[in-house]
Amino acid sequence: MRILVINGPNLNLLGIREPDIYGKEDYNSLLRQIAAYAEEIGVDVQFFQSNHEGAIVDAIQDAYFQGIDGIVINPAAYTHTSVAIADALKAVSLPGVEVHISPVEKRESFRQISYVRDWALATVSGRGFAGYLQALDILKAHLEGKAYASGD
């Protein structure tokens, strides 16, 4: 099972950018945690991060042609602005989960819009880095044809 984890703009600045909202751990720590958990649950995980909308669209399209089974995506600010990313996700029809480190539903009003939510099997918000691990669990269960059972 191959899953692509896509991170949008400014997530490469984790640990630097607004640590009171996003935490003090850096982007490499996030990748290490996801990779370790993916190995533990038997998932081949690949990573992509870009600050550029078109590059994210290209990565989504490439995922389809490379035989990726599903996508975990944190589009970051593009969540609220990018019809192009939403269209790419819908076009390739790969299952996926939207994830956000901070609780976007409790933040500014413009963050209440998500263009990718209609595509996503689920949205995980406000769980910090653990949200990515939950997203992997949700996606893996879906790909295996099982119901997701939250451990919370």
Image (cartoon, rainbow, N blue to C red):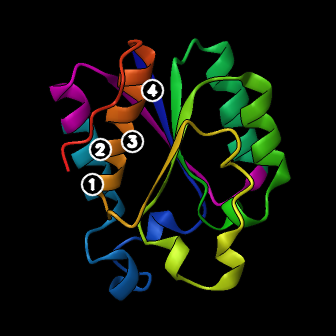
Label 3 sits on residue: 135
Distance, label 3 to label 4, CA atoms, is 11 Å
Q: Is residue 152 left or right of residue 64?
A: left
Distance, label 3 to label 2, CA atoms, is 5 Å
| Label 3: how many Cα within 10 Å (few below 14, some 14–19, many 20+) | many
Q: Amino acid at mark 1?
A: Ala
Q: Amino acid at mark 2?
A: Leu
Q: Position of residue 72 (x, y in %)?
A: 49, 39
**Mark 1 and mark 2 residues within 8 Å of each other at the beta carbon:** yes
Q: Is residue 71 left or right of residue 53?
A: left
Whether 107 is drawn above or below 79: the answer is below
| Label 4: how many Cα within 10 Å (few below 14, some 14–19, many 20+) | many
| Label 1: how many Cα within 10 Å (few below 14, some 14–19, many 20+) | some
Q: Amino acid at mark 4?
A: Ile
Secondary structure beneath dot 2 equals: helix
Distance, label 1 to label 2, CA atoms, is 5 Å
Label 4 sits on residue: 3
Secondary structure beneath dot 1 equals: helix
Label 2 sits on residue: 133
**Mark 3 and mark 2 residues within 8 Å of each other at the beta carbon:** yes
Distance, label 3 to label 1, CA atoms, is 9 Å
| Residue interval drawn in magenta | 37-53
Residue at image location 24% in from the left, 46% down from the top: 32
Kindly indicate the quadrant of the structure image that contains residue 22.
bottom left
